[in-house]
Image (spheres, coloured by chain):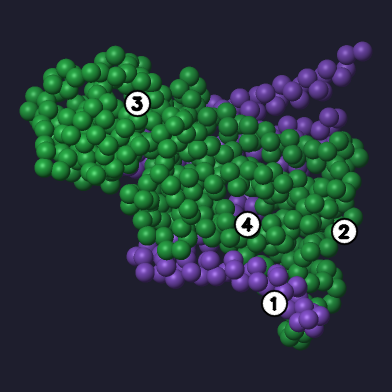
Chain colours: A purple, B green
Amino acid sequence: MADLRRAYGAAPWHALLLAGCLAVTGWIALRLAGEASAGRMLLWFLGAVIAHDLVLFPVYASLDRVVRRAVDRGGNPSPLNHVRVPALGAGLLFLVYLPGILGLGDGTYVSATGLAPRAMLGRWLAVSGVLFAVSALIYAGRRFGRRAP
Amino acid sequence: MSAGPGPHDPPSAVPARLWRGLARHRPPGVDALDRAWRSPVRGPWLTSVLGAVLLATLPLVIVTGLLDWIAYGPRLDQAFPRDVGWLHPPVFDWPTRPAWLFRVTQGLHVTLGIVLVPVVLGKLWSVVPKLFDWPPARSAAQVLERLSLLLLVGGILFQTVTGLLNIQYAYLFGFDFYTAHWYGAWIFTAALVTHVAIKLPRLVSALRGPGFARTPLGRTGPEPADPDGLVARRPGPATMSRRGVLAMVGGGALLLAAVTVGQSVDALRRTALLLPRGRSIDDGPTGFPVNRSVAAAGVTPEQTGPGWRLTLRAGSRTAALDRARLLGMAQHTATLPIACVEGWSTAQTWTGVRLRDLAGLVGATDPATARVRSLERAGLFREAVLHGGQVTDPDALLALRVNGVDLSPDHGFPARIIVPALPGVHCTKWVAEIVFDG
């Protein structure tokens, strides 16, 4: 048993568990293989991972480095997080409500709501502006509030 | 317990030559990347806190999703996808009480799915260096585990993206949403169960160890090197404390909640700033959101004019009633929510004839089902079957009026179904015929 465990690299229950997990996925893959849109589903499944790991993450990590270089000059308190937090908030809203913000709703939008899709870019910009403004106010409070005796 | 030895031990699994060779042949860039991970807050504690939050909340999203499928009525062959093989949860007749049941389960499913986005992104950020680890595996066990992680990460991202696009009516993906979201959920759930079973002891020991919930920025430093290799090898100075990271993730969740709950709460409707269901048609009594417009349904004024008749059937008995006759019957008024699978909902005051009174007109005193047909010719939901409990509930109505006025064409004039806790798509509009069975 110890040999088996060493050869495989983990305990037998680990192998059983993973066999179960992969069996569910394999069964679903076989079941969906006949669907005309199976290729598209696979593309979106793997594409979502690639879009997150190899696009979204590198992009936001690089932007963060740029912001750090531009902002972090050892101010006390540092303004860095007062840029990061509202930027992440605005980015999060953009990501989640992207179809609404860019007005991507198609014919289904019209039939479902009885309304024409309307790009809500202005609203998103306004909310983002508020986030940055509140963050700037808090920063100003922290920075200049300290000077009071 | 995790698979195999720590990240820096020599591999010993079979075939040893393969794993050793893989570990020795480091592709260019791997070492530079390994040194580039700077954040000192990455480590078992932060990952475990975020993991614990997801462990407590994701099961709710999964269960409410399954309940949604059951609410559609698999016993009446109305749940999508229809044929699900052995991935078949236990089913039951969806109850009519409490009347807010579907509003709450589906509202939770969609709202929680949205609110957890920053937690999922934070959790992925906390473990992202593992993706670029070299060697990618040191044993067959690690290869399988990595494969299951692809299903876990792909699963949660796929479910989130398809769900978000669906509720915003942007069908960019070009496949059937119900099929994809259903099977995606099972792939994700299987991978989640696997991941939790493997990692739960790690989570427990990290949370039992020294905590960082109160550590301020000034005293924030890296954790000791961990067996999973989450802690950066060459961490830079801290720019945010761990509690700061958690507050930021929590703040992101609150921000999303603030601009989402309005689609499910009438008084806050306008606060759903960026969602389709933050918009109302107008401020009048029939201005509440529409599920499918009369134009899209292709129902014409001629069909719903004075010539319209409601046909009732049970066995060999039939009856045809015009709107005046229906208005002459006993009218019942009930304030009931109408809730959509897309998570939005609204409560309105409906007036009309009880379905059980209509059944009585054709002698069906205790019907097993009622098949409701719309004037609509083409839509997926032009026909819906109600089970006996949904027909005989005292608040189950063929509504003729809403909020004291006649139904508007978009809300189903001349008559529509409204039943407590019934998914919105089964509250058939522009009703033409009801067939009682059994």
- Given residues A100 and A33, the one toward you in this image is A33
Find out whether the residues at labels 1 and 3 contact each other: C-beta distance under 8 Å. Answer: no
Alpha carbon separation for disc pair 2 and 4: 26 Å
Query: Where's the N terminus of chain A, which quadrant?
Result: bottom right
Picture coordinates of residue B235 (x, y %)? 85, 53
Which residue is tagged 2?
B225
Which residue is tagged 1?
B140
Q: Secondary structure at mark 2?
A: loop
Of discs 2 and 4, which sits in the foreground?
4
Instruction: Judge if badges 2 and 3 mark residues of a common chain.
Output: yes
Q: Secondary structure at mark 4?
A: helix
- Which chain does the numbered disc 1 sit on? B
Residue type at numbered disc 4: Leu
Q: Is residue B220 above or below residue B279?
A: below
Tell me which residue sits at (65%, 68%) in the image: A17
Which residue is tagged 4?
B192
- Given residues B279 and A135, the one toward you in this image is B279
- Which chain does the numbered disc 2 sit on? B
Which residue is tagged 3?
B395
| Residue B253 figure quarter | top right
Q: Secondary structure at mark 3?
A: loop
Residue sticking out furthest to the left = B307
Q: Earlier in the sequence, mark 1 or mark 3?
A: 1
- Which chain does the numbered disc 3 sit on? B
Of discs 4 and 3, which sits in the foreground?
3
Residue type at numbered disc 3: Asp
Q: Residues within 10 Å of mark 2 (few under 14, many from 20)?
A: few
Q: Residues within 10 Å of mark 1 (few under 14, many from 20)?
A: many
Tell me, for residue B27, which label it has, or none. none
